Amino acid sequence: MSSPTIQDPLPGKGAGLPLRLASILVLLVAIPLVLGGGWLVALGGSAYYVITGVVLLVNAVLLWRSCKWAYPLFAAVILGTMVWAIGEAGIDFWRLAPRGDVLVPLGIVLLLPWVVRAHAAGRAPMRWPLVVALVAAVGTLACSLTADRVSINGSLPGAPGAVDLADGISPEDWTAYGRTNAGLRFSPLTQISPDNVSNLKVAWTFRTGDLPALGKADPVESTFEVTPIKVGNLVYLCSAHQIAFALDAATGKQVWKFDPKLVDDNSFQHLTCRGLSYHENVANALDTTGKPAPAECAKRVILPTNDGRVIALDALTGKLCHSFGANGTIDLNKQINLVRGGFYEVTSPPVVTRNMIIVNGAVIDNYSTNEPSGVVRGYDVYTGRLVWAWDSGARDENRIPGPNETYTRNSPNSWITASADEKLGLVYIPMGVSSPDIFGGNRSALNERYATSLVALDIATGKRVWNYQTVHHDLWDMDVPSQPTLADIQTAHGIVPAIYAPAKTGNIFVLDRRTGKPIVPAPERAVLQGGAPGEWLSKTQPFSELTLRPAENLTDANMWGATMFDQMACRIMFKRLRYDGPFTPPSLQGTLVFPGNLGMFEWGGISIDPRRQIAVANPMNIPFVSRLIPRGPGNPAQPNNAHPAGTETGVQPMYGSPYGVELNAFLSPLGLPCMQPPWGYVTGIDLKTNKVIWKHRVGTTRDNGVPLPLRIGVPMLGGTITTAGGVSFLTATQDNFIRGFDVTTGKMLWESRLPAGGQSTPMTYAVNGKQFVVTAAGGHGSFGTKIGDYIIAYALPDQKTAH
C-alpha cells in the first residue's frame, strides 16, 4: 500500500479571512495608483505612482494566493518609496510623510499576528524583509523630525537696547498704523525682553460686541484686522462695522464709543477697519489756507468707513468735530460716480500729516472695466476741505473735476495705508491695478503707467515727484500690498534715506525715497510670453536682489497632500495647469499663479529696527489658480441686476473684457494647499547685506481641521512688530495664537492661545513705564478662522520699570 502524498493547497485555499481582507486593502491602494499614476505619466509627471500601483496589484494577487514572496515584495515597495521620497523631498518630515503615510500603516497591518497566521500551511511569509523595511522607514521619518530642511539658523547683527528715534513721539505711544508715518512697526520700549517675555500674561480684555452677521447682512470677507493706536492714556480702535472705541490704556475700560451707522450689505467685497488715525494741534496751528486752526477737537481721531466716509471725532470725548467737513464728515463718494455701495471702500487708516489727511480707498476687484476712480485725495485736517486730488488714470493727474464731472472711471487705486516723510514733504502711495486684475488687453496707457507702483506725491500739492513700477502690465493681482517702510540705511555710499516696499511677488524693492532710484539692484529679466487671445504681455519684469521668493520654479515634486492619493491628485492638477515660473500669464487652460493672489507679502508689511539695521518679515507660500472663462452662455459680457459676489475668490465676471475668471487657492481634494509646507514662516533680514539670516516656519495645524498642534508653518494675514527690547510679536497665523520671537535668532520664546482668529498686526505701548502688547482677535471670514470681537492686552505681572 502506497503512502498518501501531501499536495499544496489550491491558490487561496487555506487563506483565512484576515489575509483575504489584507489583499483587498492592498488592491484598493493599487487601483487608484495605477489609474491616477497612468494619468500623471501621460501628463509628463513622475512614473512612481503607476509603477508602485502595478507592483501592488501583483502583491495583492500573491497575498490572496498565500504566497510567501508577497511580504518581500511589499518590503521592496516600502524601500523603493523611501529612496524615491528622499530623492525628491530630502530629510524633511512634512515632505516625506505623505509619500509613506498609506504604505507604512498597510505594511504594519500585514504583520499583524492574525494576518500572518492566515497563510496556508507551508507558505508562511518571509516577514523579516518587511520588518527591516518598516523599521528603516519609521526610523527615517523619526530622524526627519529632528531636522527642518527649510529653516535657516543664524543671528542678526547688533544687540537689543534702548534707542532714541528722535521722531517727536513719546516712547510710550503708538500714534499711527505703523506707530509713526514711517511705518517701521518698531517700538523703542525695552521692558519686555527675550529673558522675560515668557512671563507675559493677559492684563485686560475688551469685547467690542460687534460680530459680523456672515451670510446675512455682511459679506464673507468680514474681518477684524485692526491695529489699535495709543496716545497718552487712551487706546483707540475700530471694529468690523467701523464702530470706534476709546479705552483706558491701563485697564482696557471703555471711555467712549462712536457708531457711524455703517450702510453695508453682503455684496461688499470687504467689511473691515484696519485702524484709526490721530492728529493733535501744535502751537499756533494753521490750516492749509493759513487761517488759525479751530479750537474744537485739538486732539482728534480720524475714522474711515467702508461706505465711503471720513469722520473726525474729538479724541477725548468721541464727539463729532463739527467744523470738519459737513458736521464732522467728508463724503468720499462725491464725483467718483459710485453705482453701487461697496464698490469703493476705505478699509485702511489714512495718513495724517501736520495739516493734511491723505485718503485712498479700495475699489472692487474683477467685477467690470467700469468701476469708481481710485483717486487719492488730500484734505485739510482741520476743515475737511479738499486741497488736492491725484487721479492716476487721468491725463491731467491733479485736475479736480467740476460740479457735474467725475474723476476718471476705473483708474488704479491704493487700498492700504500710505507712508509719509514730512521733512522731505512726500507721501508714498502703494498702488494697485485698475479692474479687472486678471485681464489687461483693453487697458489704456494712462491706466498702465502707475499701476502696481510706488508713487511719491508732494504732501502739500499732490503733484507726483517720482514713481517706480514693481510689475509691468500686471495680470496677477500683484498690488503693492502693504504700507511702505521708511528707514535710513547705511550703504557703501553712506547713509541713504530709503523706502522698503514689500511686494506680493516676494520682492522687497529698496529705493532712495528722495528720488525713487533703486538702492538694491532690481534688474529687468525676460519673462514668459504667450498670453490669452486679446492680451499682451510685458517682455520683462523687475526682480529685486532683496527677495524672499523661491530660487527655483515649482515642479510636481513640490506638490503635497495629506496622503499619497491627494498628493498624486495635486501632481495631476499641477501638470494640467499652465506654469512656467513667475509671471506665467493667465490662460483658458488654467494658470498656476505663484506667488499667489494673496502674495508672499500682504497688508502686514515688514518691521524694521532702524538702529540695528535689521528687519523681521512673515511671508507665506500659497499658489493660486486663475482660469479665464470666455464669454458665452452663463457668462454675459455686461452686468445684470445681480449683486457682485462679495468675495475675491470663485468666479469673477470681469464685465467689459472678453473673459470672466475663476480664482481660487490651489488646494488638494481634501482642502489643503497643494504646495508642500511650510506655507508661512518668519524671517530675519540684515539690511546692510540684504541677506536672510534666519528663517523658521510658524503656526500649527491645531485650528485647521487637524486637532494636533503640528508645527507645520501656516498661512497668515497681518504682520510683525519689533521692539528695542529684542522681541518681535506676531498674531497673524491661521491658528489662534499670539507669539513672541527673539529678534536676533528667530527662536519662538512665547505663545498664548487666542479666543478667536488673530488676522491682525499687534502693537505695543507703555503706561507709566509698564509695557503692554495689544492685539485684536476677531477672525477672518474667507480665511476660515474663528470669529470674535476681542481686544487683548498682555503685560509682565506686577512689574513697573523705566523703558
Image (cartoon, grey):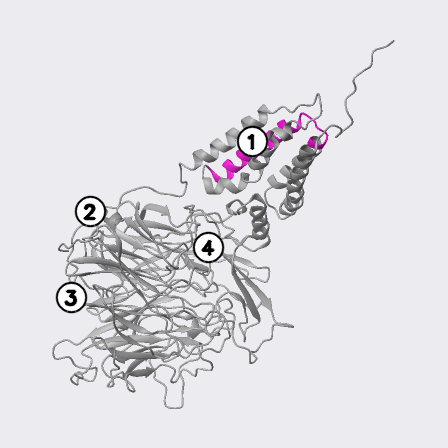
Q: Marks 4 and 3, Cα distance to the nearest angstrom?
A: 40 Å
Q: Earlier in the sequence, mark 2 or mark 3?
A: 2
Other residues around mark 2 within 10 Å, as few (<14) / some (14–19) / many (≥20) = few
Position of the C terminus, as image quadrant, is bottom left
Other residues around mark 3 within 10 Å, as few (<14) / some (14–19) / many (≥20) = few
Residue at the image point whose x is 64% and y is 31% from the top: 115
Residue at the image point whose x is 35% and y is 46% from the top: 695
Disc ID at residue 622: 4
- The secondary structure type at the circle numbered 3 is loop
Q: Earlier in the sequence, mark 3 or mark 1?
A: 1
Q: Position of residue 750 (x, y in %)?
A: 30, 48
Q: Position of residue 132 (x, y in %)?
A: 54, 26
* Residue that numbered label 3 is attached to: 168
Seen in the picture, residue 515 relative to 77 is either above or below; the reply is: below
**Quadrant of the image occupied by residue 730:** bottom left
- The secondary structure type at the circle numbered 1 is helix
